[in-house]
Amino acid sequence: MSTIDHKATRQAMTEQVAAFIANPAGWPAAMAARALRLRSGHPAYSPNNHALIVCQLWGRFAAEGLVDEAAFDAAIRAAAEEIAPRYVWSKRGYAPTGGALAVWSRPVPMWIDPATGKKATKDTPGAEERRVFRIEQTYRAADVINEDGETGAAAFAAPELPEGEARQVFERLAAWITGQGWSVERSGRDMAEGGYTVHATRQIVVHGGLAGWAAVETLAHEVAHALLHGAEDERPYAGQHRGDMEAEAEAVAFGLLTAFGQGELARGSARYAAEWTRNPERVAVAYERSCHVLDAVAAVAFGAEDVTLTRSAKADKAQAKADNKALAAALREAGLEPKGEAWRRAKAGEPIEAIAAELLAAA
């Protein structure tokens, strides 16, 4: 049986969303804005270089004995860690121990004299600019060491969560989702997001500068993403759909914070959902879609064991309502009212274009 009063929690969230939209002044910040600043890492490499790094790490882990999929997952995770050139590590007091990774340099301008085809100065009459790239080497934090024998990874480890109830809840949630084949990591590098979820590698990352209940909120949010928004969700993670998904995940965080009496943080959670949706009604629907996940997450947080996720009738009802709304909008766009024969045929799965062509021609 659920420990959450869903009616009261949904009402509280939607009322707070409406209040924030009406007057956003004085509301607490949401998630990442509450994080302590961590050590800034080396700037991210370009997408091409990142892909190049992943491929090299993939081959390296495969050579070490990991099977193909496991090697790829390990490469994705390793590529997200701190990676920097030798000179950067040297300034930090570290030296490489091996494991160099090749990347392309930034484009280097070069001027060519078209008359001779040779390198020239920029001021040479008719000189043409070319851009060339050098191959450079860069290193993972795990592949450099300082004079005390510590690897660079230690410098980018997340600070420990402070003792207390929030830490216990965080650890319970992390253990529960890890038991379902996911990994949970607290980032030791500063990052813009409060956290993120990668379904392809079943990876959850939480900003290591978030402490206490702020860390719990973010983990609950990412766990909800993990369980709600995988390959089975046909919606694209973009535009209005993304706003709905963010509200669904944050509804789980809001409900959990409320259940543990963290009202002020819950207000920041409501703000986050409001900023993504700008509509209390959408937030109410999002809550219904995710309340079964909230039930499971809350049970785990309060110490229950052997908790399994079950689909809820409320979530199914919310999904059906959303599907009907989308179908009605599609019929109206085709010039038909969502009722009578048009509605029956559309609900039966008949293409709307065919329905419109026939009914509008007969009108």
Image: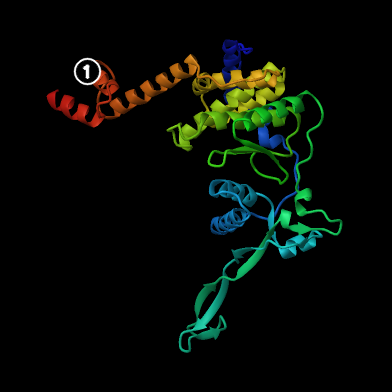
Left or right of 124? Residue 89 is right
Query: For the point 51% across and 76% down, which residue is it?
Result: 129
Query: For the point 63% across and 30% down, which residue is it?
Result: 179
Can you name the residue that lies furthest to the front here?
65
SS type, badge 1: helix
Which residue is disc 1 drawn over? Answer: 341
Left or right of 363? Residue 290 is right
Q: Position of residue 258 (x, y in %)?
A: 67, 18
Query: The C terminus is located in which quarter?
Result: top left
* Amino acid of disc 1: Glu
Residue 114 visible here: yes
Residue 124 visible here: no
Q: How is the image coloured?
A: rainbow
Left or right of 287? Residue 92 is right
Q: How many numbered dots are placed on residues in this image?
A: 1
Q: Position of residue 124 (x, y in %)?
A: 53, 85
The relative height of residue 132 versus residue 358 in the rendered view (above or below) is below
In this rendered view, identify the residue nearer to me: 183 or 314. 183
Q: Position of residue 243 (x, y in %)?
A: 51, 32
In this rendered view, identify the residue nearer to me: 163 or 9. 163
Query: For the point 47% across and 14% down, which residue is it?
Result: 313
Where is residue 339, by image quadrant?
A: top left
Left or right of 40? Residue 233 is left
Q: Position of residue 74 (x, y in %)?
A: 61, 48
Query: For the point 51% across and 75% down, which residue is it?
Result: 130
Query: The N terminus is located in which quarter?
Result: top right
In this rendered view, identify the residue nearer to me: 12 or 327. 327
